Amino acid sequence: MTTTFSLLRLLSTSDRAKDIEILVLRHQLTVPQRTVTKPVFTREDRFLLAGLLHRLPMGRLRHLTLLVRPDTILRWHRDLL
Protein backbone atom coordinates (compact mmCIF):
# COMPACT_ATOMS: atom_id res chain seq x y z
CA MET A 1 0.00 0.00 0.00
CA THR A 2 2.86 2.34 0.81
CA THR A 3 4.42 1.66 -2.59
CA THR A 4 1.14 2.57 -4.28
CA PHE A 5 0.97 5.90 -2.48
CA SER A 6 4.62 6.56 -3.31
CA LEU A 7 3.85 5.82 -6.94
CA LEU A 8 0.95 8.27 -7.01
CA ARG A 9 2.94 10.97 -5.25
CA LEU A 10 5.97 10.67 -7.53
CA LEU A 11 3.98 10.57 -10.77
CA SER A 12 2.35 13.92 -10.02
CA THR A 13 5.69 15.77 -10.19
CA SER A 14 7.02 17.43 -13.31
CA ASP A 15 10.12 15.35 -14.06
CA ARG A 16 8.23 12.23 -15.12
CA ALA A 17 11.17 10.26 -16.57
CA LYS A 18 13.20 10.66 -13.39
CA ASP A 19 10.26 9.61 -11.27
CA ILE A 20 9.63 6.51 -13.37
CA GLU A 21 13.28 5.56 -13.09
CA ILE A 22 13.19 5.95 -9.29
CA LEU A 23 10.05 3.82 -9.03
CA VAL A 24 11.55 1.09 -11.20
CA LEU A 25 14.75 1.02 -9.18
CA ARG A 26 12.83 0.86 -5.91
CA HIS A 27 10.68 -1.96 -7.18
CA GLN A 28 13.71 -3.88 -8.42
CA LEU A 29 15.19 -3.65 -4.94
CA THR A 30 12.12 -5.32 -3.45
CA VAL A 31 12.34 -8.34 -5.78
CA PRO A 32 15.69 -9.71 -4.46
CA GLN A 33 14.49 -9.17 -0.90
CA ARG A 34 11.71 -11.72 -1.52
CA THR A 35 13.98 -14.37 -3.03
CA VAL A 36 17.02 -16.22 -1.76
CA THR A 37 18.75 -17.07 -5.03
CA LYS A 38 18.20 -15.62 -8.49
CA PRO A 39 15.57 -12.85 -8.46
CA VAL A 40 12.25 -14.11 -9.76
CA PHE A 41 9.86 -11.57 -11.23
CA THR A 42 6.21 -12.36 -10.66
CA ARG A 43 3.57 -11.59 -13.27
CA GLU A 44 2.67 -8.44 -11.30
CA ASP A 45 6.34 -7.39 -11.20
CA ARG A 46 6.58 -7.73 -14.97
CA PHE A 47 3.39 -5.75 -15.53
CA LEU A 48 4.50 -2.95 -13.22
CA LEU A 49 7.95 -2.63 -14.77
CA ALA A 50 6.64 -2.89 -18.33
CA GLY A 51 3.91 -0.36 -17.63
CA LEU A 52 6.34 2.17 -16.17
CA LEU A 53 9.28 1.67 -18.50
CA HIS A 54 7.39 1.77 -21.80
CA ARG A 55 7.08 5.56 -21.37
CA LEU A 56 10.85 6.06 -21.43
CA PRO A 57 12.69 6.62 -24.71
CA MET A 58 14.71 3.60 -25.90
CA GLY A 59 18.01 5.47 -25.50
CA ARG A 60 17.32 6.20 -21.86
CA LEU A 61 15.99 2.69 -21.26
CA ARG A 62 19.21 1.16 -22.59
CA HIS A 63 21.30 3.27 -20.17
CA LEU A 64 19.39 2.18 -17.07
CA THR A 65 20.93 -0.42 -14.81
CA LEU A 66 18.22 -3.07 -14.74
CA LEU A 67 18.06 -6.62 -13.46
CA VAL A 68 16.75 -7.65 -16.89
CA ARG A 69 17.64 -6.60 -20.42
CA PRO A 70 15.62 -3.78 -22.07
CA ASP A 71 14.47 -6.26 -24.72
CA THR A 72 12.91 -8.36 -21.96
CA ILE A 73 11.04 -5.29 -20.67
CA LEU A 74 9.73 -4.63 -24.18
CA ARG A 75 8.61 -8.25 -24.50
CA TRP A 76 6.79 -7.99 -21.17
CA HIS A 77 5.07 -4.85 -22.43
CA ARG A 78 3.95 -6.62 -25.61
CA ASP A 79 2.64 -9.48 -23.48
CA LEU A 80 0.79 -6.98 -21.31
CA LEU A 81 -0.97 -5.50 -24.32
Image: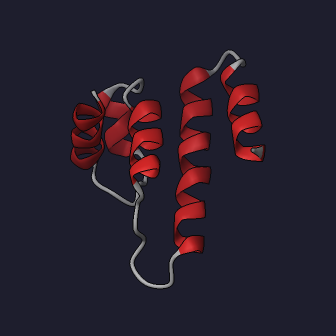
Q: Residue at x 54, y 39 (%)?
A: 21
- Place residue 14 in its image quadrant: top right
- Tell me if 9 is positioned left or right of 77 in this view: right
- The residue at the far bottom in this view is 36
Q: Residue at x 38, y 37 (%)?
A: 50
Q: Residue at x 53, y 45 (%)?
A: 24
- Give the tally of numbered discs: 0
For this rendering, which residue is in front, 65 or 25? 25
Asked if 29 appears above or below 12 in the picture, the reply is below
Asked if 64 appears above or below 11 in the picture, the reply is below
- Tell me if 77 is positioned left or right of 24 in this view: left
| Residue 59 coordinates in the image, percent (x, y) | 31, 32
For this rendering, which residue is in front, 1 or 74? 1
- Tell me if 40 is positioned left or right of 25 in this view: left
Q: Quadrant of the N terminus?
A: top right
Colour style of the rendered protein structure: secondary structure
| Residue 47 coordinates in the image, percent (x, y) | 41, 40
| Residue 18 coordinates in the image, percent (x, y) | 59, 31
- Tell me if 7 is positioned left or right of 70 in this view: right
Q: Quadrant of the C terminus?
A: top left
Q: Residue at x 33, y 57 (%)?
A: 68
- Place residue 4 in its image quadrant: top right
Asked if 67 appears above or below 47 in the picture, the reply is below
For this rendering, which residue is in front, 4 or 9? 4
